[in-house]
C-alpha cells in the first residue's frame, strides 16, 4: 500500500503541519478506445509519406486501374446521354447577357455538375476528356439555336472553302473545334422545325456543318506526323424531308394542304411571293454538294444519312429527289439508312 502525506492548516497560524498518512484510492486503468497495433507509426524523417494515396494527380483514384477510372468518369459524365449544343447565351450575346444567364452566367449555381470533373486536375482532365470525346455522342439540332454559329453565306461558298469562315468570333471557332473532337456526332432536323422552315436554308446549314467538321479534321490530321487511327462516325437524320409538301411535293400536296401552305408562306416569306421551283432546286443542289463534301472526307469519317422513305405514288417530286440522293450516296461511299415513319 502506498501512503501519501495529507496536510491541514492550523487555526489562524497560517502554517501547515503534518497530521497523518492515508492510503490512496484504488486506481483503475482506463480502457483504450482503439488498438494501438492498428495505428500507423510515424514515418522516419526523409521517408516518403505512405498515407498519401494515388500518384500523378489522380488523388485517391490513383489506386484504381486506368480502365476502372474510365468507368468512374463515364458515370460522372453521364455517358448514356447525348450532349446537345447549348441554346442560351450564344456567341453573339453581349457580356451582360452572358453574365445574367441562369445556366452559365457569373452568378450561376451548380445544378447539374456534369462536367465539373474536368476541372479537378490536369491528369483527371486528360483521362476524362478521352471518355467525353470517345464514349459520348454529340447531338447537333439544326434549328434556330444553331443559327448564330453558322455563316449566313456558308452554303454559297465553294466546296473547298466551306468551313473557312467564322474566324471573326473566337466563341464560334471554339465551338466547332470542340465539336470536331467528338468521335460520334448525330445531326438531325427537328420534325416540327422541318414542317415550318425553309428547306433550302436547312439543307444549306447541313452543308456548312459538314464543311466545318471536315476542315477541322483535315487540319488536325495534317498537323500529326502519322495518320491517326481514330475514325469519326457521323449520322445525319433528315427525317421526312422527302415527304414534306415543300420543297419537292408542291404539285401533289399543295391543293390538299392549302391552309398549311399559307401558314408556311406567312412564316418564311411575309413580304414577298416565294419561288417554289427555286427552293426545290436549291435544296437539291445543297444535298448534292453535301454528298460531295462527305466523299471528300471519307478518310476522316464514316458518314450515314437517315431519311424516311415511305412515299406515295403521287409524290413524284419527292421520289425523284430521293432517288438522286441514293445515287449520290453510292458514288461518294455514304451509307443510307431507310426509316419508317408517317
Image: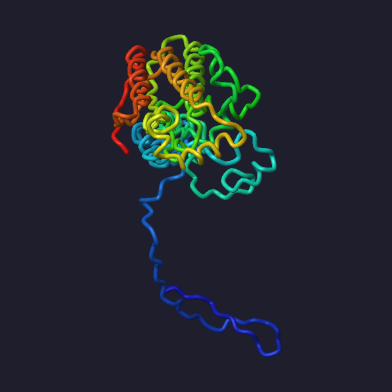
Q: Is residue 282 above or below residue 272?
A: above
Looking at the image, the residue that sits furthest to the front is 255
Q: Is residue 172 left or right of residue 192?
A: right
The way the protein has been coloured in the rendering is rainbow
Looking at the image, the residue that sits furthest to the bottom is 11
Quadrant that contains the C terminus: top left
User: Residue 305 is drawn in which quadrant?
Assistant: top left
Q: Is residue 173 left or right of residue 74?
A: right
At which x and y percent is residue 307? 35, 29
Which residue does the image show at 50% across and 75% down from the upper left? Answer: 4
At which x and y percent is residue 251? 40, 29
Residue 16 visible, this orientation? yes
User: Residue 312 is drawn in which quadrant?
Assistant: top left
Which residue does the image show at 35% across and 33% down from the upper left? Answer: 65
Quadrant that contains the N terminus: bottom left
Which residue does the image show at 54% across and 29% down from the upper left? Answer: 274
At which x and y percent is residue 135? 38, 32
Which residue does the image show at 39% across and 34% down from the upper left? Answer: 253
At which x and y percent is residue 28? 39, 71
> Along the line of sight, which residue is nearer the eye, 251 or 278?
251
> Along the line of sight, which residue is nearer the eye, 160 or 125?
160
Q: Is residue 166 above or below residue 144?
A: above
Residue 127 visible, this orientation? no
> Along the line of sight, which residue is nearer the eye, 175 or 22?
175
Q: Is residue 58 above or below residue 319?
A: below
User: Residue 249 is drawn in which quadrant?
Assistant: top left
Amino acid at each position: 500500500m502506498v501512503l501519501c502525506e495529507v496536510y491541514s492548516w492550523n487555526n489562524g497560524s497560517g502554517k501547515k503541519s503534518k497530521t497523518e498518512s492515508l492510503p490512496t484510492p484504488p486506481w483503475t486503468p482506463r480502457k483504450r478506445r482503439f488498438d494501438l497495433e492498428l495505428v500507423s507509426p510515424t514515418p522516419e524523417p526523409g521517408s516518403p509519406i505512405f498515407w498519401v494515396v494515388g500518384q500523378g494527380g489522380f488523388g485517391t483514384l490513383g489506386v484504381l486501374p486506368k480502365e476502372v477510372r474510365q468507368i468512374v468518369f463515364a458515370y460522372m459524365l453521364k455517358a448514356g446521354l447525348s450532349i446537345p449544343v447549348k441554346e442560351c447565351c450564344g456567341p453573339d450575346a453581349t457580356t451582360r447577357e452572358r453574365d445574367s444567364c441562369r445556366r452559365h452566367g457569373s452568378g450561376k449555381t451548380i445544378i447539374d455538375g456534369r462536367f465539373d470533373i474536368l476541372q479537378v486536375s490536369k491528369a483527371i482532365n486528360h483521362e476524362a476528356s478521352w471518355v467525353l470525346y470517345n464514349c459520348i455522342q454529340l447531338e447537333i439540332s439544326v434549328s434556330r439555336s444553331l443559327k448564330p454559329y453558322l455563316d449566313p453565306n456558308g452554303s454559297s461558298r465553294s466546296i473547298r472553302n466551306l468551313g473557312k469562315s467564322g474566324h471573326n468570333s473566337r466563341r464560334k471557332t471554339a465551338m466547332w473545334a470542340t465539336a470536331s473532337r467528338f468521335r460520334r456526332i448525330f445531326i438531325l432536323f427537328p420534325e416540327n422545325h422541318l414542317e415550318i422552315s425553309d428547306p433550302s436554308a436547312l439543307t444549306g446549314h447541313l452543308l456548312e456543318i459538314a464543311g466545318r467538321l471536315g476542315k477541322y479534321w483535315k487540319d488536325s490530321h495534317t498537323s500529326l506526323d502519322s495518320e491517326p487511327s481514330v475514325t469519326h462516325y457521323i449520322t445525319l437524320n433528315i427525317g421526312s424531308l422527302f415527304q414534306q409538301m415543300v420543297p419537292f411535293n408542291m404539285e401533289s400536296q399543295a391543293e390538299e394542304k392549302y391552309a398549311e401552305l399559307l401558314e408556311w408562306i406567312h412564316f418564311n416569306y411575309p413580304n414577298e411571293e416565294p419561288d417554289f421551283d427555286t427552293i426545290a432546286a436549291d435544296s437539291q443542289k445543297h444535298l448534292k454538294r453535301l454528298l460531295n463534301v462527305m466523299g471528300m472526307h471519307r478518310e476522316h469519317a464514316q458518314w450515314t444519312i437517315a431519311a424516311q422513305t415511305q412515299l406515295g405514288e403521287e409524290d413524284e417530286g419527292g421520289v425523284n429527289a430521293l432517288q438522286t440522293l441514293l445515287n449520290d450516296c453510292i458514288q461518294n461511299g455514304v451509307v443510307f439508312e431507310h426509316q419508317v415513319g408517317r
